[in-house]
Amino acid sequence: MLGSPTRLATRHPAIPQSIGLDSPLMPQPENPLNQSTPPHSWALRRRVLLTVLILIVAAASTIYGLAQLNQDPQDDGMAAEPPAEPICRAEGEFVAGFMSPQADNDKTLDILETMNTDAVTFGGRIVPAESADYPGEVADAIGDRDAYEYTVAMTWDGIELADSDQIVQVGDTSYGIIAAGDNSVVVTESTDGTDHFHSLTRTTTEHEASAYIGLPVPQMRTSGEAWLPDNSYAGVVDAFSQKFVTAYQQRGADGFYLAMEMPLTHEAHWNPVTDYYSRQTQIINDIAPGATVLISPYLEGRADRQTITPETAARGYQKLLGLDNGTRIVVSPQDGVGVGTTALVADDSEAHRVTVEEYFEALHAVDPERLYVTIEAMRPGGGSPDSRKPTTRERVEQQLTATEPYVQGAIGFQWAEPNSMLHIDSIGDGACAAGPGQLH
């Protein structure tokens, strides 16, 4: 205990051992010695004595009561018990979590401390833009070049830029006009110096945690196979990625996340995604040799869909590991429990052909050292195909326990709204967290 509050000092008045005719509390009557006292005088004295006693007792009680009110409840010498630490009842542990860094460093640090793990960010997009949509000074800097926009706030403070790059300040907003490929620029934007990913790298250094930054991705195709990326401007994406990786590697990123998703399969149909992966790992390794790169594909075990078999998933896992180009690729498949594409053995589901345990057992047989699991901390439902319902502590612990025998650790999805892991009892208080610096 840092210190006890000062107690109320009390001093009780001295009370005579006996109260009688000779007591100084009573005036002496003018009465000759040895003369008997009239009866009415004795009655008067008794009433006065009784009144004095009542006043003394009342005063003592009042002082004692005030002392009790001001007494520290811990002054009895027993320290209050600290709040109980959240207890993890699962076999597995979280080594990282997907999170959305804040513009304010203190708020980002608050999330990190609550997670008590390493952090992975989502990636922004690079999308076509019109120079006319920007302030005149920015449009003039773009000129007749093709414009693209990077959708996450970013600054270039402290980064040495090429002569072809330009920073334009308009009021409190800084625009980066970043040359990217032939006759193209990517425009970045930051108001009041906001840079969410830089906030994360600053705070992870303070918290001794690791930061894995999501790389930019292109938009998806607007027609036809809309689940595949639009690689028509892949050169722009790659040229910007080189400068993006350089910036955040200098700012302390410990690795990178390839944010574009695909199912865990080896099928050639998904080559537009794996081609993107391969190009990015080459860029990363040229700038940060041997850096860790995270990929998080999804699974499909439902009976009424094109089911991914464990054998197909294993071949897909092997294909992803082969895209490293010198980096260290780690694969963390989404367990599918939160969106209903898979089920646990304990669910005894008739709607699924493959369980989570069967998938991860097959993947573990290929390469256990680079296998993690992304725990979907939510439940199917919520009223629309894109909505999810909150999950429970018991369900998350089931998911951790089911995959623990096969993986190096779990990555929580997600420490942001909606359905934030912050709101899961015990889990959101840091239970089942391995501590920072555990995702390798």
Image (cartoon, rainbow, N blue to C red):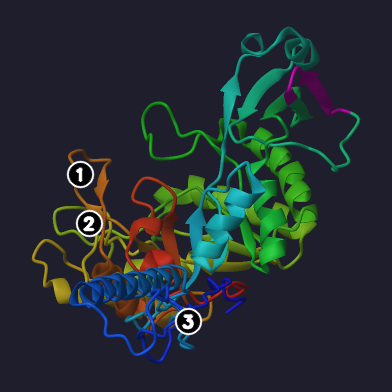
Q: Quadrant of residue 382?
A: top left
- Residue 171 magenta-highlighted: yes
Which is in the foreground here, disc 2 or disc 1? 1
Q: Residue at x 14, y 54 (%)?
A: 304
Residue at 46% across, 34% down: 220
Q: Amino acid at mark 2?
A: Gly
Q: Mark 2 to mark 1: distance in Å?
A: 12 Å
Instruction: Please report the bounds of the magenta region as a residue range.
Output: 164-174
Dividing the picture into quadrants, the one containing residue 205 is bottom right
Badge 2 is on which residue?
340
Residue count near mark 2 (Cα–Cα under 10 Å), binned few <14, some 14–19, many ≥20: some
Nearer the observer, 60 or 416: 60
Image vertical order of residue 43 relative to residue 162, above or below = below
* Camera-side mark, 3 or 1: 1
User: Is 130 located above or below residue 303 in the figure?
Assistant: above
Q: Nearer the viewer, residue 191 or 264?
A: 191
Q: Nearer the viewer, mark 3 or mark 2?
A: 2
Query: Of helix, strand and loop, which mostly describes the magenta segment?
Result: strand
**Regarding mark 3 in the picture, which secondary structure is present there?**
loop
Q: Residue at x 17, y 39 (%)?
A: 383
Q: Secondary structure at mark 1?
A: loop
Does residue 288 appear in this view?
yes
How far is disc 3 from disc 1 in space, using C-alphas? Answer: 35 Å
Q: Which residue is mark 3?
A: 368
